[in-house]
Amino acid sequence: MFKKIFLFFPPLLLLLFLALSFFHIKNNQNTFTPKSDENKQIELIKDALQKSIFESTDNMEINKSQKFFKFQIKNNQKISTIILSLTKDPYLQITALQKAFKIARINNKYIKFIDLSLNHPYATLQNY
């Protein structure tokens, strides 16, 4: 009788070990939520805007077909329209935007419109 229990015990122990290993591996798998590159880029732009000096308004427009992100910011009680590219680094674009606003402020002007989505960005300046 003891030999019969001893013969069944190792396979039973091995089966229990395999079952516990399977459940442990299954429960520890990371969940994967697929995101498109544009959605990731939009999240990075929003993160860069939150870390910047700009006070963003809620008026945001995303055009995925032409790959740009358009929004408005309030700067010294003036509203500026900004267009950023969804293909370029958002942190570099926000840095360039901050430099453009700094230069405009030094020249006693404000930026009414700036488009950083093109290969040759441009801005429309107005006097205060």
Image (spheres, grey):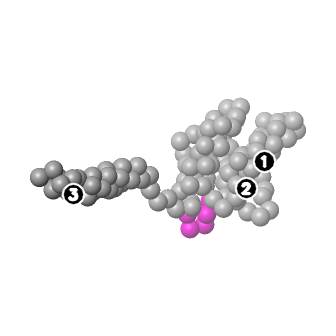
**Distance Cα–Cα, label 2 vs label 3:** 75 Å
Circle 3 Cα neighbour tier, 10 Å, few/some/many (<14 / 14–19 / ≥20): few
Q: Is residue 110 above or below residue 20?
A: above
State the residue in front, 114 or 94: 94
As helix, strand or loop, the secondary structure at mark 1 comes to: helix
The residue that appears at 52% across and 62% down in the rendered structure is 36
Tell me the number on the disc at residue 96.
Answer: 1
**Distance Cα–Cα, label 1 vs label 2:** 9 Å
Whether residue 116 appears in this view of the structure is yes
Amino acid type, callout 3:
Leu
Res 10 → quadrant: bottom left
Q: Is label 1 in contact with label 2 (beta carbons under 8 Å)?
A: yes
Amino acid type, callout 1:
Ala
In the picture of the structure, the residue carrying the numbered disc 2 is: 116
Q: Is residue 18 left or right of residue 101?
A: left
User: Which stretch is magenta?
Assistant: 62-68
**Distance Cα–Cα, label 3 vs label 1:** 74 Å
Q: Position of residue 126 (x, y in %)?
A: 78, 44
